[in-house]
Each structure stands twice: as C-alpha cells, then as structure tokens.
Image: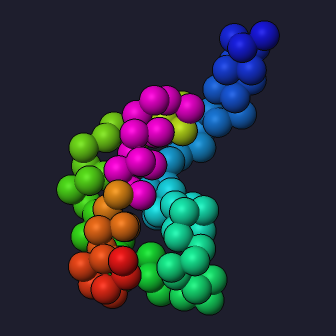
Amino acid sequence: MEYAHEEAMRILLHGLHFSPYALLREVVENEFANEVAESDHEAFCRKLYPYLTNLFAGYDTSDDTFALSPAHDLLYTELVGTVMLYLEGTHGVQ
C-alpha cells in the first residue's frame, strides 16, 4: 500500500519543479501564523528569501520527487529554525 502511494505521488509530481520560495511561504503560514500577520506573509517572505540562498544551495532540489524525500523534511525543519532565529534577532520576538 505504501509503495502504491509513493508511486502515485511520484507520477503526480513528475515534471513539477520544487520551489524554495513556496516552501518558505508554507513554513511561515504553518509555523509562524501567530508571529507574522497573514497580511504580512508575502512581504516577510520576500524580505527573508535572499538570505536563504546558502541554505537552499545545500539541497539538490532538482529531483521531481524532492518534496517526498527525507531531505525535504530536513529542509523544512531548517527553515523553521532559520525563520525563528530571524524573528528573534530582527524583530525581538521571544
């Protein structure tokens, strides 16, 4: 059953390219809804995104199935930590 699900997802994702910016948006929306107002999500992500090039460069996101990989989960976790540090350092959020 799990194999069938993985195969179906692989087929669905074939040809779709991973978007680091979309993942950043997802992290901000899912993990920082209380810290960043919904109306500020886009501006916040645009401001933070240029600082994340080294983080994203550490991952090979060219594979169609990157979104299903353990590396994607690790990148998500690293983004959560990075956004948290950014908020604490820049905005004084505790």
Q: Give how far across and how far down residue 35 sits, in percent.
A: 51, 79
Q: Give how far across and how far down residue 34 sits, in percent.
A: 58, 77
Tell me which corner region of the image, top left, top right, bottom left or bottom right, holds residue 85: bottom left
Q: Quadrant of the C terminus?
A: bottom left
In the image shown, does 91 or 21 lie closer to the viewer?
A: 91
- The residue most toward the front is 94
In the image shown, does 36 or 8 lie closer to the viewer?
A: 36
Q: Is residue 30 above or below residue 34?
A: above
Q: Give how far across and how far down residue 50 sits, in percent.
A: 29, 72
Asked if the magenta segment contains residue 71, the reply would be yes
Is 44 on the left-hand or right-hand side of 3? left
Specify the segment rendered in magenta: 68-80
Q: Is residue 21 above or below residue 19?
A: below
Residue positioned 24% across, 79% down in the render: 89
Q: Is residue 90 above or below residue 57?
A: below
Tell me which corner region of the image, top left, top right, bottom left or bottom right, holds residue 61: top left
Is 2 on the left-hand or right-hand side of 17? right
Q: How many marks?
A: 0
**Residue 2 makes an appearance in the image:** yes
Q: Give how far across and how far down residue 80 sits, in percent.
A: 42, 58
Q: Is residue 71 above or below residue 23?
A: above
What color scheme is it?
rainbow
Asked if the magenta segment contains residue 1, the reply would be no
Q: Main secondary structure of the magenta part?
A: helix
Residue positioned 54% across, 63% down in the render: 31
Residue positioned 45% across, 49% down in the render: 76
Is 87 on the left-hand or right-hand side of 10? left
